[in-house]
Structures are given as C-alpha cells and as structure tokens.
Amino acid sequence: MSCAPYGDAEKGTLEITSPQVTVGHDLTNEKKPIEIDVFPVRSLKRDAPVLASKPPARLPKPEKIKASNYVLFIIWYNAYRRFFTVVFTLNFVGLGFAIADLWPYAKKYPGALVLGNLNFAVLMRNEVFGRILYLCVNTCFAKWTPLWFRLGCTSALQHLGGIHSSCAVSGVAWFILMLVNQYNARHLYDSSVLVFGVITVILLFITLLAGLPWVRNTHHNVFERSHRFFGWSALISTWVHTLVSNLHDVADGRWGHTVIYVICQQTFWYNMSTTVFIFLPWFCTRKVRVDVELASPSPKVAVLRFERGMQQGLLARISRTAIMEYHAFGIISEGKHAKYHYLICGVQGDFTKGLVNNPPRMIWTRELKFAGVSNTSTLYKRGIRICTGTGLGAALSTCIQSPNWYLIWIGSDQEKTFGPTISGLIHRHIGPERLLLWDSKERGGRPDTMKILREAYYYWQAEVVFITSNYIGNAEIQQGCKSLGIPAFGTLWDFALILETGEGGEYNYKTDVPNDGSEDRVQKCYGTKLQ
C-alpha cells in the first residue's frame, strides 16, 4: 500500500506519557531575542500576559484507560482500508469471472482493464486532480451540509491512497492474467509482445514492492527512487507493449494494423492519460530562492522561507536535486496576500541535517502545492488543531488564516527551538483566547493530553479535531477522541499495518473535571480563565 504524502511535515516529537493539565502559555516572555544565522526577522512583542504559573515539580500520575478492541478496530479499518477493500474485491471478482470465461469484455479487452486500473492509481496521486477535488468539496459543501457528511468528505479526501494502492495491485493482477492468456496462445502472438509483457510485469512488480510499508517506513529514499524510476520504466515498457500488441494482427500473424487503428484503441488513450497524469506535476517544478533561519548554534529545527503567500492546508515538496528524492513539509503562511511562506524542518535525517550544515540558497520545489487534510478545515464552523513539535508546520496556517480554529501546541522550549519567526507569527495572529501552548521543559513534563483536548473541545464548541503528532501520539489521541465521541482526524499513517500496543495503545485521561464545556469548567481545569 502507498501512503499520502505527509512525511516529515506531519511528524512531531510528542511521547504522551506524562500527566498534568494546566493552562496554555503565551509564546512571549522576557528572554533575550534569539539571533538568526541566515536572515533577520522582526522582534517578538513582549506585552502579552502570562496565563499561568509554573506547575508543581511533582505531578500526580493520571489514570490510563485502555481503548476497547472496538475502538482499535474502527480506527484501524479506516476509509483507506475500506476503499482498498471495495476496489480490490470488485477487481478480483471480475478476475474470477474472466478466468471462468464468463465475462466476454475481459477476454476481448484485457489491456483496457489493466491500464484502466493503473490510470486510476496514478490519478489518485496527481496533485492537480487533488487540488481540484479539494476545491470542489470545500466550495460546495462548506458549513451548510450536515456534520456527518462533511466528516465523510474529509475522510474520503484524506484516504484516497486506498484507491491508489488497490488499483495498482489490481492492475498488476490483470496484467499477469493477460500475459498468461497470451502465453497460452503464443502461436498467435509475435515474440516481442510476450517479451515486453514480461518486462512490464517485472517493472510493475518492483514498483509495488518499493511501496510496501516496511520499505516506505525504514528506507524512504530507496522507496522514492525505486517507486519513481521503476514506475517510469514500467510506463515506457507499457507503451511499447501496447503499440506492438495493437500493431500485430493475431488473425493472420502479421504486422497488418495501421497507426490509425492503434490510435482508436482504448489502451492507447489510457496510456496517454496515464502519461499526462504522471508528468503534469513535474512541469511545475522550479528551482527557487530559499532563506534558512537557524534558531541556535546547535539547532533542532531549520525554518525555510520562500517568496509568495499560500492558502492554508497545503504542503510542499522540496529537494536538492530536480528529480531525486523529495521531502514533504507543511506550509506556514499568513495568506495568499503574504510576502512569504515558511516550512519547519526538524533536523533528523541526512536531508534536514544538510539544511543546517550547508544551508542552500536555491532549492527545487513544485510550485503547484498539494493539499493536506487541513485544507478541509473550511468545511467546519469551528475546530481544534492539536500538534506536537514540528507538526506545527502542518497546523499553524489553519489557525492563522481562520479565527474559528483553536491551536494546541505541545513542545519543548518552543521559542528557543523554533525561533522568533514562528513565535512572531503565532503572537501576531492567534489571540490567547484560542491558543494553548504547553512547554514541557518549563512545566516539568508533558501534559495529560486528552484532558486538555477534551476541555478545549467543549469550551470552543468545536465540530472536529485535527491531530498532527508522531505515530504513538497520533494513535493515542485518536483512540481517546473515538472513545469520547469526538470527531478527529490524525496523521495518515497508512503504512502502519497495526496499531502499537502498550503505551501506544492507551491514552491518559482523568474524569475529575465535568465535561459540560462551560468556560468556568475550563478555568478550573487549567487554573486560569481563557480569555
């Protein structure tokens, strides 16, 4: 299976194991402004009130309530897997009919079924198609439709990868069946048809293997390069196989068909559309100027600044080279009118370390950005955006550009780690009435996340929660929200075949605060009033 391209942009640094709930803490304090290594930024204002005092050194350990097996199954069997099940089942029922010789169309036009599936697989990962789909849904169904319908739209858009994966697997299966039938009647076919058929199947199979969960998760660069270059090779081989199959006339064993005949075949146009879908986004690839901000001499985060503003809910792919591995990060921007947009890159792998050790002045990116789940935030009247660490990169634009979204950001020493650029954006655009910041270093540990989220959800009268965290944090919060009946969408870890057990399968939650959602209850929970 393949996964939606969220990658580094959607990964945070949270490990939800510590208790305690207090108030959000404003980013502004009396620390000396941090100097920037590469480009200057405006100083952060210092006049915002501090919302809470420092909590006690030792905090009581909260109860740990394990999610039920039903909740775990519902989260695991998400729309991604439901899409995969439906498409996979339909295709393999068709394969059964074709093998039993009960479907004349499959026997007469096997290539159309092969390329039709592969065409849809590529389409689901096309940035242009994705942006159009998000635009249509956000324009037509925002706010006025029933909540269950809007939640369904978000779920379907987020999990289109299920159609991508199932169509790819089904296309290879149809190709194998077509090749077996051609081999059984090999006296009717020229040897070139069989040879290029075998080559194409091998290339497609390697492309599928490169997209397996283990490869994607542990060897991302191997996955991306193999998936891309073997996929392109398979496309070329498919073209050759299509042309030789259609030019060769099986009726008399000669090359009797004309070019006009080939152009009139379904397979020709399926191949043409697949080629367009694959290469269209690459026409938007440009080498652009970038400035890099490093918040300290030994930074954990690099903030990249690009020209022009962006709408909320978009992600960017960047690379040092034109066609090698690309890395996805959430885009932070004040809006389309803004002069700049920013990417937060956690310093973890070789690519992000290179941004620190050798900051680039020019970098490759696709100027057509692709939409993430946050892009559907316009569907909802009010919502919560909870994130940890560098997950802020995928969350901040939504809260900056919409006053109806509440931000919860959990991290460690945020201003020092992320620098005054990010701190300034938060301070200028998000008031204390819709900001809850938890600095785990200052407060002596990480919070009871579900308690914070639950109280903020009822206080803000939110319709939905969007989560951006690491795998364990994402699973824990989703399990807690599902158990409490709170609609929530988390990072799309579609490469995770099973939910982790133990600490990752539990969430921290205490029942000592009523859930009527009143502002007074929120004040009791946090020790201060959210203004």
Image: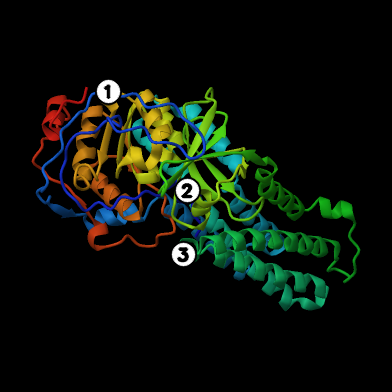
Q: Amino acid at mark 1?
A: Ala
Question: Which type of secondary structure does the marked residue at label 1 adopt?
Answer: loop
Q: Earlier in the sequence, mark 2 or mark 1?
A: 2
How packed mark 3 is, by other alpha carbons closer than 10 Å (few <14, some 14-19, many 20 or more), is few
Question: Which type of secondary structure does the marked residue at label 2 adopt?
Answer: loop
Q: Which residue is nearer to you in this view: 228 or 248?
A: 228
Name which residue lies at 56% across and 37% down: 131
467 left or right, relative to 167: left
Name which residue lies at 49% across and 31% down: 40
Q: Amino acid at mark 3?
A: Thr
Residue 235 found in image quarter: bottom right
| Res. 152 visible in picture | no
Spot occupied by residue 263 in the image (x, y as percentages of width and height): 82, 51
56 left or right, relative to 148: left
**CA distance for labels 2 and 1:** 34 Å
| Res. 522 visible in picture | yes
Q: Amino acid at mark 2?
A: Tyr
The circle drawn on residue 48 is: 1
Q: Earlier in the sequence, mark 2 or mark 3?
A: 2
Q: Which residue is mark 3?
A: 218
Name which residue lies at 76% across and 73% down: 195
**CA distance for labels 3 and 1:** 44 Å
Q: Which residue is mark 2?
A: 6
Residue 174 found in image quarter: bottom right
The circle drawn on residue 442 is: none
Relative to 526, residue 492 above or below: below
Name which residue lies at 49% across and 61% down: 216
